[in-house]
Amino acid sequence: MRPVPHDPTQLPVRLLAYGGLGGLAVLTLINDGATRMYAMPWTALLAFTCAAPVLALALRAFSPANPLRLPSAGWLAVAAATALVPLAAAVLSPYRGASLLQAALPVAAVAFFLLLNDWIAQDPARRRPGLELALGAAAALIVAVSFGEWVRVTLRLPSAEIFSRALFERRNLFPLGHANYTAGLMLLALPWLFAATRRDSPWPRAVIGLVLGVALVNLFLSGSRGGIIGLAALGAVGLAVAGLGWKRFLFASAGVVLLAGALAVANPRIRQLLAPADPAAAPSISSVQRSAMLQAAVGMGNDRPLLGWGPGTTPLVYPRYRHSLDGGAENVLQLHSTPAQLWAETGAAGLLVAAGFLFLALRGWRQARVAAAALAGYAAFAFTDYQLDVPVFSAAVAALAALLVPAESPGAAAAGVRRILAGAVLGAAGVIAVFGARDPAPALNTEALALARNPAQRDQAVALLRQSLALNPDQEIAHFNLGWLLVMPDPAAAEKHFLAAAHLVPDKGGVYFGLGLARLGLGRTDDAARAFALECLNEPLFLASPWWSEPAIAAQRKRTIDHFYAFLARATGPASPTVATWWDFQVPRLRSLAPRLGQPSAGDEKAFQRDRLGYPVLMRNLDLPVPTDLYVVREDPRFPASVPFPLPSKGWLPSSRLLNLLDASAP
């Protein structure tokens, strides 16, 4: 009997595998892991978690005693494209360094998939059920942690809130830090928990049934519309692949639909979002934001249709398109739709790879029915969110793909193929390690805003903001604050920066006021009054701002009122003969307040500067301090209570209409 050859790669591969899985578990289970991973030391853990499968795959490829087993040609081609397309998109991106860092995750996910496929192929009869059991255990752990953290935080609330309807409006954000992530985790967990309840042993079945119920509660508490859609798809596909007769299938499907409908109706947030829109009510902020994101995604992809802007570049590119959108957030981390995100960041090539993956998964559903159901539910949910930039989701999809690979996949790969594969993954990792880097502009911005607090360092702050804009001119934060730094010493330059900021974020509070001050400094009083009127239109609270107590500004009151009336007349389109839009509904209300423009009440004022709390997350660098705008907001706290109707909030008018008014009033 020949002795088994010694495999020197076995131990380091195992250490890397266990280390990578450990890092994945920590980043998943720690609170706010989806954003915390962008701060040290968690960023280092994220880097190791991504590097571990890549290095392990390279070592496995060089194993002489136990050659690496690769999947079938179709799956191998899709896997290669899944890594190469984001990498190519990142290399060709205008934001190459930052994009390459985000390309590390799909490369790691592909390596993880190939390692799992190799591990299963060595002993399919034992290891396939082993992986399914591990996924079920991981699902149970995540469900327990999610619910436990929600309960812990909830018990700290006042008793009146715990025992009220408001309790069900508190979305479950745990463990990753956002309710949509909770919904995605539960959709991936539910099929494995349900499958575990079908086992023979009654005691584990009862326990797992309880965990299954908790997973449904977590999904309900996420308040996610997409989660309910995913649950319906998960149930329908799960029943379809279960091999039921058509009568039982229809009966069970009706039950799933009723369950999803009951969860949607019972959750106050989902019920409100799904209710018919009242034309006289303010548009849903969530719906406006999602509509804006889809508009931006179409524009981003159309401008770079082959490979998109590069993975992870949405926060950097979105401001280019913000002016053409009807409201929404000033900036976004992701576009809340996986197809939209792929189109924007990886172009047609990314969508083609996704289509190839879904085709292979559909063809192999009989190989792993539970995995197919899980993937179907999550795919339906993915139309309403994008989560593949979070390690647990990319790893979960890789694991489902490994289960869907046909059992009759080819055996050990030839030595030449293995060497090419090892060289490819190491080359990809090398490109990311050498050329990947955080975007330097956000650090320049935050440093400049910190320095600007000291008048002696304002010149240095101006220089840093100009340096930042030289790297990326599409930054409202830099233009806006540079305008405020220059409004007194150089009003002409300040005007240009305020105009640039307004065209990037048309509903930015304070941008038209700053523009008016710059024009006032240039002696163009009528143009200044027009800008002040736009500020009142965009942010009605400015109608009674204590800033009007300043003599130079108060002198423009009559002109501003005249322009305010004129802007209101042009601010909205013709109303429908039967139903007026919400925007048209606000015009007569604001017109009635025009005589009060520039008349703050006597008493204490509310003065503050706006913190940009989400900026470090958007820039994927939580080591940055939270920047604070230089504009001092001054409000009359008694004004809203003195108005006989609710004041529309800042940005109530669609951005395109604001810009039309701004451009029409340009000198």
Image (cartoon, rainbow, N blue to C red):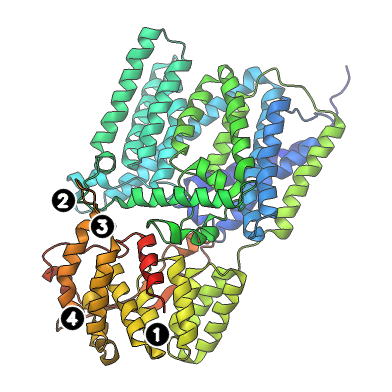
Q: State the separation of the CA atoms marked 3 and 1.
A: 29 Å
Q: CA distance from mark 3 to mark 2?
A: 37 Å
The answer for how far apart the CA atoms under marks 1 and 4 are is 23 Å
| Labels 1 and 4: the sequence-earlier one | 1
Q: Residues within 10 Å of mark 2 (few under 14, many from 20)?
A: few
- Which label sits on residue 519? 1
State the residue at coordinates (70%, 23%).
121
Task: Answer with the quarter of the image where residue 645 lies.
Answer: bottom left
Task: Measuring from the top left, give residue 13's x and y in whole percent.
Answer: 72, 39
**Are the residues flagged by discs 1 and 4 in contact, CB closer than 8 Å?**
no
Mark in front: 2 vs 1:
1
Q: CA distance from mark 4 to mark 2?
A: 37 Å
Tag 3: amino acid = Trp
Q: Mark 4 is on which residue type?
A: Pro
Label 2: which residue? 160
Circle 4 Cα neighbour tier, 10 Å, few/some/many (<14 / 14–19 / ≥20): many
Q: Amino acid at mark 1?
A: Arg
Say above or below: 246 vs 561: above
Near-viewer residue (438 or 157): 438
Left or right of 69, for residue 129:
left
The residue drawn where x is 64% and y is 41% is 349
Asked if one can make out residue 196 in the rendered structure from this viewpoint, the answer is yes
Disc number lying in front (3 or 2) = 3
Other-residue count near label 3 (Cα within 10 Å), few / some / many at <14 / 14–19 / ≥20: many
First in sequence: mark 3 vs mark 1: 1
Residue occupied by mark 3: 583
Q: Indicate which disc, 3 or 2, sits on the residue closer to the N terminus.
A: 2
Viewed as shown, does residue 342 lie left or right of 609? right
Q: Considering only order in the chain, which callout, 2 or 4, is on the residue closer to the N terminus?
A: 2
Mark nearest the camera among 4 and 3 is 3
